[in-house]
Amino acid sequence: MKSSIALLGFALAMSPVLAAADQSPTTDAAGSFPRPNFAAMQQMHAQLEQIHKQARLQLLASLTPAHRTLLANVVGQLAISPNPDRAVAARSLDAALSQGEQRSVLSVEAAARTQSHNLMEASRAQFEASLTPDQRAAMQTRMESRANGHEGMQAQRTPDPGMILLDLAGGEGHEHHGFGPGGPMGMPPPQ
């Protein structure tokens, strides 16, 4: 769990600079860390987006046509509601899905989350390899201090098919529950 939190901290720390980035291997403004390889980060973002798109297609394919329509209606109701309640909407989807559909949704989400996590771990390892031992220690300390506030929140997350489907649709709160560029890895879409 700590490595996931550390990975989230790394991703959040690195992603905002994509818009203004160049590819030079110089140090950052404070002079303490080398700049990451932004071309590699953009490639990682593209791969994360592809994982998300594939999972979306698999999730939609796992639903009956009637349940795809239900999902669209529920998302539409959330969009126009003055007080949207995603938890109630997720429970209504959960109640409608067959056990097979629920298992399929959970399986697809878990596979996409694992693929995303592995991709980000590899990227983090590649970046850390470019650091000196002192820089690695400083980065580890920084990520641990950021992770302490998020640990309890992440530990309480239980995958729920209805919420996964709502996240798939990209409704309000998408960035807190889903997978892919806006999901638990905290990676914003590429600029």
Image (spheres, rainbow, N blue to C red):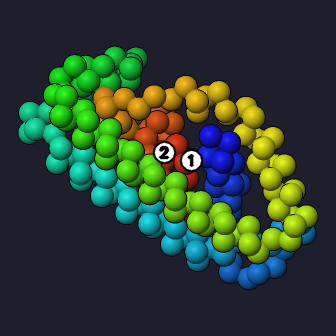
Query: Residue 65, which numbered label?
Result: none
Question: Pointers 2 and 1 in contact (CB under 8 A)?
Answer: yes
Residue positioned 51% across, 36% down in the render: 176
Q: Is residue 141 left or right of residue 5?
A: right
**Residue 84 pos. (x, y %):** 38, 21
Residue positioned 8% across, 39% down in the render: 65
The residue where tag 2 is placed is 183
Q: Is residue 189 visible?
A: no
Q: CA distance from mark 2 to mark 1?
A: 5 Å
Q: Callout 2: helix, strand or loop?
A: loop
Residue positioned 25% across, 45% down in the render: 59
Residue positioned 41% across, 32% down in the render: 159
Kindly give the residue lying farthest to the bottom in the view shown.
24
Quarter occupied by the N terminus: top right
Q: Nearer the viewer, residue 42 or 97?
A: 97
Q: Counting other residues with Cα less than 10 Å from the Cα at mark 2, is it few (<14), some (14-19), or many (20 or more)? A: many
**Residue 63 pos. (x, y %):** 16, 39
Name which residue type carries label 1.
Gly
Name which residue type carries label 2.
Gly
**Residue 95 pos. (x, y %):** 22, 19
Q: Is residue 107 left or right of residue 156?
A: left
Query: Residue 186, which numbered label?
Result: 1
